[in-house]
Image (cartoon, rainbow, N blue to C red):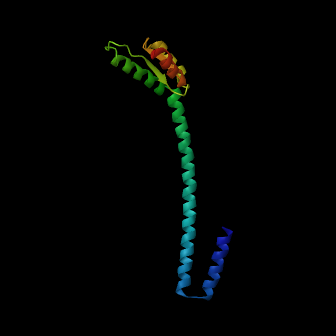
Amino acid sequence: MRGQNELLKNIQSQLKIYQRPDIFGQLAAISTSAAAVYQIKRLADQTERVAGFLKGIEQNLSSHHIRGEHFPQHVHSYIRLLIERYTSDTVPHYFTVLNNSDLWHPKFADIQREDPLGPLYLGHRTDLDEPCAFLAEEVRP
């Protein structure tokens, strides 16, 4: 900033000596550029602040949905829907949930105690290897 101020003072002193139109054009271009650079920096700073606020909001919403009522209840309702959809089939269908997070498990367990999904629901897992091993060892043979 100090360098720009010195440059502008230098141009201003030269402008007093030379009264040619091309110097006026250069001065206008420099002052316009300085104003534009200032505005761009101000907008970039505001954008960073807004991005920080949005990240905080996203983290709060994610935490609320995972630990709160929405996600565990949605999982329970969806499994219930699938179980009901396939109850008329002659071959039983079994269901499990694979999700690498376990933050929703306590609320899901509360819902399960109040409204059990029954024996067709095999539980929830956080490790993909576990259901794959079960399928390979128990179901395939």
Q: Is residue 53 above or below residue 8?
A: above
Disc count in the image?
0
Q: Quadrant of residue 73?
A: top left
13, 101: nearer the viewer: 101
Q: Is residue 55 above or below residue 26?
A: above
Answer above or below: position of 89 versus 47. above
Percent of width and height locating residue 126 = 54, 24
The answer to whether residue 13 is visible is: yes
Q: Where is residue 104 in the image (x, y as percent from the top left)?
A: 53, 24
The answer to which of 75 and 68 lies nearer the viewer is 75
Residue under the point 50% across and 22% down: 132
Residue at 48% in and 19% down: 135
From this viewpoint, is residue 111 visible? no
Which residue occupies the foreground of this view, 22 or 94?
Answer: 94
Percent position of residue 124, x then y: 50, 20
Give the image location of residue 125, x and y in percent.
Answer: 52, 22
Q: Is residue 131 left or right of residue 89?
A: right
In the image, taking residue 86 as reference, residue 19 lies left or right, namely right
Q: In which quarter of the image is residue 120?
A: top left
* Residue occupying the point 65% across, 75% down: 7
Residue at point 58% right, 55% down? 45
